[in-house]
Image: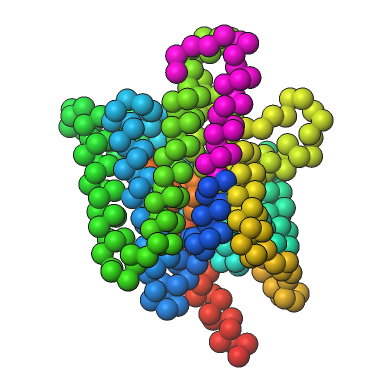
């Protein structure tokens, strides 16, 4: 996309929002059908040594990496336009936020995207998790916890001379062209993950392949919508590069922590005309509607509530940790673990590892509690 007139901006924004909603609808429906769950993937590996859902996640990462870097190498999008690849490497934020989010999602029974999918299927406790997660995220974005995040956590890090994605770092160190490195590294990383995910013959079942390929494809698809369809080389008002319908002003793909907070904000102040549906809000709504549509169509829709007081407390604490951790780490299992990692951002790789480590700690904590109470 190059330039458009001021009059064309609402139409372009509507196109970006509608396309994102449609892709997120697919994400929600597929996740409802296949049980795609990043928390469950970690729990299955730790508790049972079962890598099936982890292979789904890794297959999704592989497809997202291949698609995203292929588009970048072809010049359709520029990963430097994503906030995941910014030169500022906030090491403490990635680690602290990732650990908090990973531990919290175990207590809450799933990450933000899984909570949306489960709420679409009738889970009332997941609906409560979403409300608390959104509140916690908003407080971390703009409220009291923002002071802790901005003044105590985010300053701990370093500033790279270039963008922090691996192709940019290697291009600066070697002098090799970035597009060539994006293609090579995309094929190397994505190909390796693809081979690992598909190595087990018992994994090669329709739902497993659907989960990985569809989810990874949706991530790459939203990058295209945001970074190509919605990109303005010259905004008609500011005469600067811009990305239509994104809350960050940068190229975005799916994420489910800050966007849940933005969705609550949009719903609460719906009559305020300054509140508009952004790409992130469209992703949240599309995922919920897609999950609900599939659950209702297949007879899976069932109301579900909290088991007891302890179950309620665990979910509330977990939701608060996810809201704080997801904002601090700049993303969740989908935002950092798929969208961010697909750009080969060094910070996203650290955040992804920290989320997994936090989830492992959470699973072991849950096992310890069961043994103690048993």
Relative vertical location of residue 58 with respect to residue 239 in this rendering, above or below: below
* Residue at the image position 56 percent from the left and 59 percent from the top: 32
Residue 54 picture location, percent across and down: 40, 64
* Residue at the image position 29 percent from the left and 39 percent from the top: 166
Residue 188 picture location, percent across and down: 22, 47
Q: Is residue 230 visible?
A: yes
- Residue 41 counted in the magenta span: no
Between residue 13 and residue 22, name the one nearer to us. 22
Between residue 365 and residue 184, name the one nearer to us. 184
What's drawn in magenta, residue-wise? Answer: 1-24
- Residue 22 counted in the magenta span: yes
Q: How many marks?
A: 0
Choose top left, top right, bottom left or bottom right for residue 345: top left
Q: Is residue 344 visible?
A: no
Between residue 324 and residue 158, name the one nearer to us. 324
Residue furthest out toward the bottom: 374
- For the C terminus, the image quarter is bottom right
Relative vertical location of residue 259 with respect to residue 351 in this rendering, above or below: above
């Amino acid at each position: 996309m190059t330039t458009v007139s001021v009059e064309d901006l609402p139409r372009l924004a509507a196109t970006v929002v509608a396309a994102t909603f449609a892709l997120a609808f697919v994400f929600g429906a597929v996740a409802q059908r296949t049980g795609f769950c990043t928390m469950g993937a970690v729990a299955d590996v730790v508790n049972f040594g079962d890598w099936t859902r982890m292979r789904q996640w890794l297959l999704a990462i592989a497809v997202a990496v291949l698609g995203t870097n292929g588009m970048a190498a072809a010049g359709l999008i520029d990963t430097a336009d994503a906030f995941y690849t910014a030169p500022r490497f906030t090491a403490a934020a990635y680690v602290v936020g990732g650990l908090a989010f990973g531990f919290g999602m175990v207590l809450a029974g799933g990450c933000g995207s899984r909570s949306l999918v489960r709420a679409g299927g009738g889970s009332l406790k997941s609906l409560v998790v979403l409300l608390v997660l959104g509140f916690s995220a908003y407080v971390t974005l703009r409220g009291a916890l923002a002071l802790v995040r901005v003044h105590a956590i985010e300053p701990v890090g370093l500033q790279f001379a270039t963008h922090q994605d691996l192709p940019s770092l290697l291009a600066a160190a070697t002098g090799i062209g970035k597009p060539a490195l994006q293609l090579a590294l995309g094929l190397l990383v994505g190909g390796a993950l693809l081979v690992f995910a598909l190595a087990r013959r018992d994994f090669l079942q329709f739902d497993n392949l659907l989960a990985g390929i569809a989810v990874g494809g949706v991530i790459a698809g939203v990058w295209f919508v945001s970074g190509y369809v919605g990109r303005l080389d010259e905004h008609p008002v500011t005469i600067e590069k811009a990305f239509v319908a994104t809350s960050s002003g940068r190229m975005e793909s799916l994420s489910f922590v800050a966007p849940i907070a933005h969705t609550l904000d949009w719903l609460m102040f719906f009559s305020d005309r300054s509140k508009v549906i952004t790409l992130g809000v469209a992703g949240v709504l599309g995922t919920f509607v897609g999950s609900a549509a599939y659950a209702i169509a297949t007879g899976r829709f069932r109301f579900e509530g909290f088991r007891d007081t302890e179950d309620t407390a665990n979910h509330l604490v977990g939701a608060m940790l996810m809201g704080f951790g997801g904002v601090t780490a700049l993303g969740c299992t989908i935002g950092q673990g798929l969208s961010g990692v697909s750009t080969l951002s060094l910070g996203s790789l650290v955040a992804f590892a920290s989320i997994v480590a936090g989830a492992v700690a959470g699973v072991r904590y849950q096992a310890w509690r069961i043994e103690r109470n048993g």
